[in-house]
Amino acid sequence: MPDLNHFKNKKILVTGHTGFKGSWLSSILINAGAEVTGYSLLPPTTPALFEIAKISKNMNSVIGDIRDYENLLKVFDDTQPEIVFHLAAQPLVRESYKNPHYTYETNVMGTVNMLECIRHSSSVKSFLNVTTDKVYENKEWDWGYREIDPLDGFDPYSNSKSCSELVTHSYKNSFFNTTEIGISTARAGNVIGGGDFAADRIIPDCIRAAIKGEDIIVRKPHSIRPYQHVLDPLFAYLLIAERQSADISSAGYYNVGPNDEDCYNTGDLVKLFVEKWGENLKWRNQNDGGPHEADFLKLDCSKMRTRFGWKPRWSFPTAIDKTVEWSKCWVNGGDIDKLMEEQIKLFLK
């Protein structure tokens, strides 16, 4: 686990801070005593975790577009961040088919803008670009992809993230090889957890159906994905950022995924969710004939384990349990701030 004291009083910039993962990451850093600045568009969903948990009250929240280089550069100049986490993105596969131009512009040129700002910054010591497990050329293998395997995502979202990786590699080789700035990317699997309200994601779809008392519609029950609770990759990101700040040789390209036994097919995932939620919830298979999505995807996380001694903390059943706990607390008007703090403390134990 990372030493959270490393982030105390550090100036940290988080792009995409109003999103699901960005909100959880900002909350962790705020509680660690960091000076957190966020740069992002307005929350991408209604409702939104960022607003439910009132995260903006304890940080410097800047609403801006990652495509706006001049505005982004001003934020760098004004805040002088030491550590930068880049999470801002157009993150949905189906949306990328509808708006490929916006997807590439955000995910590729947004990364270029970030790296240009870092290139002209005298304060940044550590940069982590958060991408996705979908960056790989997916051959539907039975074994996990390694960091040395070819990058070539199929759909516009996945491919734009492959390009974001390549942009990061190029900038690292071209401009940062003779500096002491740690530059890394992290390729995470599918994350679940309380507060994800995104469209076209299976757990948010399950929660929406449960709240309405409707059957859960499952498009591809046999698709296998590496699922993990959101806290697992976030603490891996913090670990990478901490280690490369202290030792630049720790910088690199890392897979961050669950154990093999937590690579579930979507049908079994929904069965487990229904069991945890209760209330006679049901699901049914209804393929809508949508665009191409991979049927099988798994990561080999040996590099993270070997280099950092890292391993996932929460099994998939635990991740589902904590997601249901958060969702029912929210539905019943409970104290979300307190629950999130409790879940983070429990994870750290």
Image (cartoon, rainbow, N blue to C red):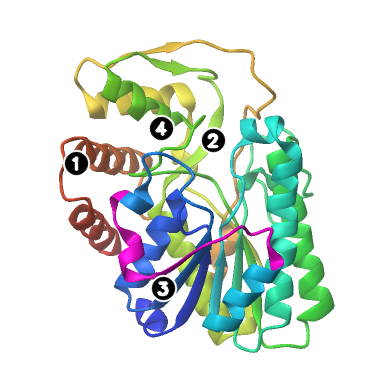
Q: CA distance from mark 4 to mark 3?
A: 28 Å
- The image quadrant that residue 281 belongs to is top left
Q: Amino acid at mark 4?
A: Ile
Disc on the earlier residue, 3 or 1 = 3
Q: Which residue, given by chain and number where applicable, does mark 3 sit on?
A: 2
Dot 2 lies on which element? strand
How many residues crowd around disc 3 within 10 Å: few (fewer than 14), some, or many (20 or more)?
some
For numbered disc 1, what is the local secondary structure? helix
Q: Nearer the viewer, mark 3 or mark 1?
A: 1
- Which residue in the protein does label 4 denote? 203
As measured in the structure, the alpha-carbon distance from the residue carrying label 4 to the one carrying label 2 is 13 Å
Q: Nearer the viewer, residue 145 or 115?
A: 115
* Residue of label 2: 225
Mark positioned earlier in the residue sequence (4 or 3): 3
Q: Is residue 291 above or below residue 323?
A: above
Between 58 and 126, the residue placed more toward the observer is 58
Please identify the quarter of the rendering in which residue 183 is found.
bottom right
User: Where, by quadrant of the figure, is residue 208 drawn?
Assistant: top left
Residue 228: % across, % down:
43, 45
The answer to whether residue 286 is magenta is no
Q: Which quadrant holds the C terminus?
A: bottom left
Mark 3, secondary structure of its residue: loop
Task: Indicate left or right for 253 with 194 as reference.
Answer: right
Report the Cα–Cα distance between label 2 and label 1. 27 Å
The x and y percentages for residue 162 are 74, 50
Q: Earlier in the sequence, mark 2 or mark 1?
A: 2
Q: Find the magenta span and give its range.
A: 52-69
